[in-house]
Image (spheres, rainbow, N blue to C red):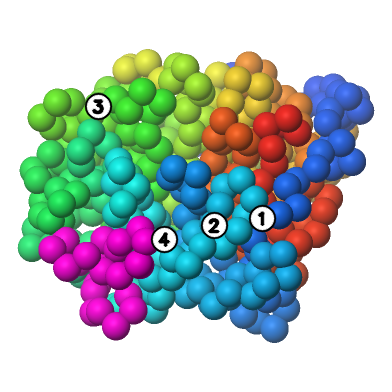
Amino acid sequence: MVSKKASSLLLAGLMAVSLPVVGAGGAAAAGAIKGASDVTAAPWTPSLSTSGTDGTVEQVRQLVPCNGTMYAVGRFSQVKQSGTMYNRNNAFSFSASDGTVTNWDPNVNGQVNSVAMSTDCQTIYLGGSFTSIGSTAVSNIAAVDATSGQVIQNFLSSANKKVNTLVMSGGHLLVGGNFTSINGSGTDYMVSLDPGNGTDDGYVNLNISGHYVYTDQGGRASAANSTQVYNTALSPDGSRLLAMGTFTSVGSQARRQIFMLDLGATSATVSSWYSPEFDQNCAAGEPFWLQDASWSPTGSTIYIATTGYKPASGPGYNTWEPRSGLCDSAAAFSSANSTQTHQWVNYTGCDSLYSTAADAAHVYVGGHERWANNPFQCDNNNSGTAVSAPGMAGLDPNSGQLNYNPTRARGLGADDMLRTTAGLWIASDNAQNSAACAGEKGHAGVCFIPADQL
């Protein structure tokens, strides 16, 4: 792949001039913002049982609801709720209203990255890096019974490399990952499977390819990265899907970091929605930087959450310079099917964001960030605008200004956020005993903030 260094320099220069960043007046505005002392997280949620201080870092990677039950997947061996310990390997479920852990125990022998459900909630699909569920041999993908947790044998269960993301849409199980073959299909990286038997139903054929190769301003080569679909976000009306990952070509269209699919009646096609800002290279150690995206309730706006540390070249490359580009930030874009430029950007000051969700009042972002409203410096809060907002933040959907600040223990970072009608669910980890959410302990791995606290 040809280096994008020259175009990154041009792009960074343009963004340094035109970027509508938040910051001015941010610290003063924080006095009126609902913070940790004003917010109460639900005390009944289950949590990871270990502190992570012994080096055993565990993580909930995704939380998904179905008929009043929450399904949690990730990397863990035990969970606890109301003083009771439960042995659960990498997948468990619990009541969405009182946290009671169910008997559902598929016992997966490796990390589960994603979970999806059949429309009747009777079949649970799991994807990740694993070789058995219970006593049944599988390979990185499987369907299990929602009651017994046993593998459903008539659903094929073999991907040659890890599965990162699963989403059910329009009678199709859309699957993304590092795989180059799955359930007998040679479709690479993203495929649509028949939910009944797991075969490729032909709905997705994108010819995804490419990865990120460049040299930064200091002469460092980009770290190893392989083609993959890492994450997905379905639009509120189910007609469009965002996919994030490592690629340079999707459906014969030039795409980096993210692409949008129009989900038609008979096939999924690459939308014209895109921004040249996604072509930017961030720090050489973080070639893939656009980790998550969410939709506004109306579907008219897309919000992104990024890592990347700092630009690979040009304005913002030096840590003492004002930030530029989209590295380590949250940003908003119109979802219209055309070439886009950002509506606003909120910088963390060079700390990673991994997840986002949104409602009409807030754009929620989570990671291991220390600040929000920090556009002027990297790893420093002396800009005069930065506001302490560790672990998570809520931003105004119109301006990008911090407008909700319950805080969360930083740990590795919030890996998933989900806004339901009941409230905001946050999936995280236990690194360095990170268990606080909205100022309260006991929430390692799972936190729920009810809607009346948002």
- Residue 424 quadrant: top right
CA distance for labels 2 and 3: 34 Å
Q: Closer to the observer: label 4 or label 3?
A: 4
Q: Tag on residue 89? A: none
Q: Tag on residue 94? A: 2
Tell me, yes or no, whether the two marked residues, 2 and 3, touch with CB atoms within 8 Å.
no
Per the image, the residue denoted by label 3 is 262
The quarter of the image holding the C terminus is: top right
Per the image, the residue denoted by label 4 is 113
Q: Indicate left or right for 7 with 430 as reference.
A: left
Q: Secondary structure at mark 4?
A: strand
- Residue 97 quadrant: top right
Residue 65 in view (yes/no): yes
CA distance for labels 4 and 3: 24 Å
Q: Is residue 146 part of the magenta span, yes or no?
A: yes
Residue 367 in view (yes/no): no
Decide which of tag 3 and tag 1 comes sooner along the chain.
1
Decide which of tag 2 and tag 3 comes sooner along the chain.
2
Front-lying residue, 306 or 382 = 306
CA distance for labels 2 and 4: 18 Å
Per the image, the residue denoted by label 1 is 45
The vertical placement of 129 against 213, above or below, is below
Task: Report the magenta residues as a range.
Answer: 133-157
Q: Secondary structure at mark 1?
A: loop
Q: Residue at x 39, y 48 (%)?
A: 231
Tell me, yes or no, whether the two marked residues, 2 and 1, touch with CB atoms within 8 Å.
yes
Decide which of tag 4 and tag 1 comes sooner along the chain.
1
Q: Indicate left or right for 287 with 392 as reference.
A: left
Residue type, numbered disc 3: Asp
Decide which of tag 4 and tag 3 comes sooner along the chain.
4
Q: Residues within 10 Å of mark 2 (few under 14, many from 20)?
A: many
Q: Secondary structure at mark 2?
A: strand
